[in-house]
Image (cartoon, rainbow, N blue to C red):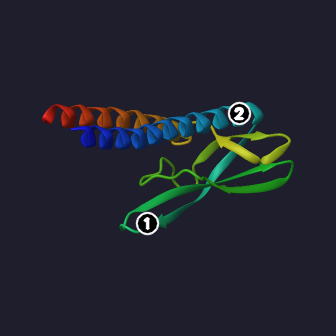
Amino acid sequence: MDDKISMLLIVDCVFAVTCVGLIIAGLIVRSRNKAKHERCTLVTNGKVADITISNDSDGGSTQHPVFSYEVGGKKYVKTSSVGSTNTQYAIGDDVVVHYNPSDPHEYYIEGYKLEGFTWIILVVMGIFIAITATAVSVILLNAN
């Protein structure tokens, strides 16, 4: 019985570190997004110039919108770092671009749903793993 409890404690510690790591990563992503929104104070109109598709090892694909916008006569073309299996955009769609006046390469797209979603996924995964690990531990401890 003591070996069983020791093993469960070790496994629970691994899961706890994983959960805390995911939650902290999610909060860091949220904090960085918030700071970027505070720096990107100017607005311009832009367009969806393209949709890039990247294939993964299991046969799926991810679509990343490519946005273009102009600041001070200079054209910027930026591929979103966040993608999905079905993008909310089509090539040629108009978008509102918020950009950093000190560094117009830094931007975000008004209404881009996926940008603010990443941190939520990380936090929810951390909480889900914590609940699942706790439930499994309680079941295994009560099994004997």
Q: How many residues crowd around disc 1 within 10 Å: few (fewer than 14), some, or many (20 or more)? A: few
Amino acid at dot 2: Ala
Q: Residue at x 36, y 35 (%)?
A: 128
Q: Is residue 43 left or right of residue 139?
A: right
Residue that carries the numbered disc 2 in the rendered image: 35
Residue 4 is situated, as x and y percent measured from the top left of the image, at 25, 41
Q: Quadrant of the C terminus?
A: top left
Residue 36 is situated, as x and y percent measured from the top left of the image, at 71, 37
**Residue 74 numbered mark, or none:** none
Give SS at disc 1. loop
Q: Where 64 falls versus 120 (above or below)? A: below
C-alpha separation, residue under disc 2 versus residue under disc 1: 31 Å
Q: Residue at x 71, y 33 (%)?
A: 35
Residue that carries the numbered disc 1 in the rendered image: 56
Give SS at disc 2. helix
Name the residue nearer the viewer: 74 or 84: 84
